[in-house]
Image (spheres, rainbow, N blue to C red):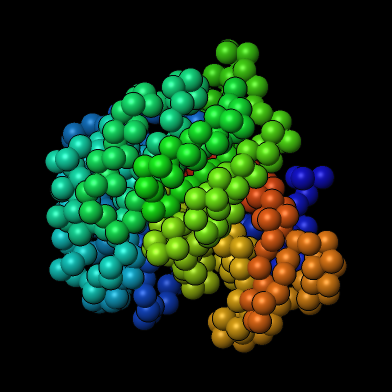
Amino acid sequence: MRRLLPKIFRLLLSGKTSSFVFEPQEVTLPPNPSGINLYIHLPFCRQLCPFCPYVKAVYNHATSAAYKQAIIKELEGYRGRWGNASVESVYFGGGTPSLTPEIIGETLEWLKRNFHLGGEIGVEVHPLDATNSVLKSLRDSGVNMVSLGVQSFNDQRLKALGRDYDSNLAKEACQRVLGAGFATVDIDLIFAIPGQSVDELEDDIGYAVALGADQLSAYPLMFFAYMPFRQKLERAKAEMPGWWAEREMLKVAVKAASAAGYRRTSIWSFNKPEARRYTTVTKDSFVGVGVGASTMMGDYFSVNTFSLPEYIRATAKGLKPALAAKLDDRDKLAYWLFWRCYDLAIDTGKLKQLFGRGLPFPIRGLLPLLKGLGVIERRGDTIYLTESGAYLFHLIEKEYTHAYLERLWGACLKEAWPKRVVI
């Protein structure tokens, strides 16, 4: 039944049951976008964590230098199309972006010279990179938001994830980052790790709160069929926590963060009331730069090639997306509503402003039932997901990840330039 959730949810949001078709095609972007959101993918890592599904590669100096030139070349294409447009936010993800702070610095300098750069600049930082010199380099470059990928403060869980540091180093890294003067520091945790107990997760949340994180993110461990983590589990004869244990862990995370004064800002994140939110996925539209990066803008959702050598080669000739799907108005509305559910709040006034209409008829018809079941509550023009509603969407988001992203990314990892992917 859970595997049907993405299709049922899509039917409710868009009234469609047809598949998404991703093909190589010419993508037409809006001529004068306002408030561009950039995501820049830096794939290099010291080692490849077995649970990570993203495009990544072991660091190599020569390849890194060529890659830096390639992402500037891709950005130049947007500069030629849009002139010195306004860029509201820039987020560097990976991979391990903090492993190559020189790429971050030089890319931000280029952006400052060529675009009107806004004030939201975020970077994912690995605990081993949280040195005073790296943090100073990031601050000097203009970075004001950091997400520190701790994953856990428990040595056994860090070992299970294949992380290359211990809990003491993780805590020291948190202290240095939190003392470095960034506007927002997110401590990124993972729960539902094999062998993890509810008490261990509560301890992890407690450590992050005690350290003074501006934001806590607690994501369930999800691994894809193409990742080596499944084989790692089988060799260790370990099992993932069951759905009930996972649900209890999420409840504990919500309760512990709320008791410490954090407000829930998405199904998996919590912020101090005054803290700006670190978020890359919930923007209405975004431009992805780099190998494997996605773009959602105008009438298209597109992805760059997942092959690092091919990305570097192709940018020299004028990079085109590896695959793209054209979206109609119902698809775009469904996409927007999906991420508002992730944010736990649907502003129907903004919906009308953006799309010139109210909620889709099937959703409107279900509102009394959802309210009666305690899944939603309405205050003014905004519909909020309750804790029960947030858990339901937690399940939907997990199944969406497997039904759509796992299949798309898996196909893109098999071929640098896939001919067609239907999902």
Identify which residue, 203 or 84, lies in the foreground.
203
Q: Quadrant of residue 88?
A: bottom left
What residue is at 77 percent from the left and 45 percent from the top?
Answer: 2
Rendered view: 240 above or below 278: above
Residue 219 vertical placement versus 6 (above, below): above
Q: Nearer the viewer, residue 285 or 314?
A: 285
Residue 408 percent across, percent down from the top left: 57, 47
Tell me residue 242's x, y (percent).
71, 31
Residue in the foreground of this view, choosing between 402 and 407: 402
Q: Quadrant of the N terminus?
A: top right
Figure check: 202 above or below 123: above
Residue 127's quadrant in the figure?
top left
Q: How many marks?
A: 0
Res. 185 in view = yes
Residue drawn at (72%, 69%), measured in percent from left and top? 377
Residue beneath the point at 53% across and 72% down? 299
Please tell me in which quadrant of the rendered image residue 12 appears. bottom right
Q: Is residue 322 visible?
A: no
**Residue 393: image x %, image y %?**
68, 54
Q: Give the side of residue 344 with respect to residue 185, left or right.
A: right
The spot of residue 319 in percent (x, y) is 34, 56
Residue at 50%, 62% (x, y): give it: 282
Q: Is residue 327 left or right of residue 396?
A: left
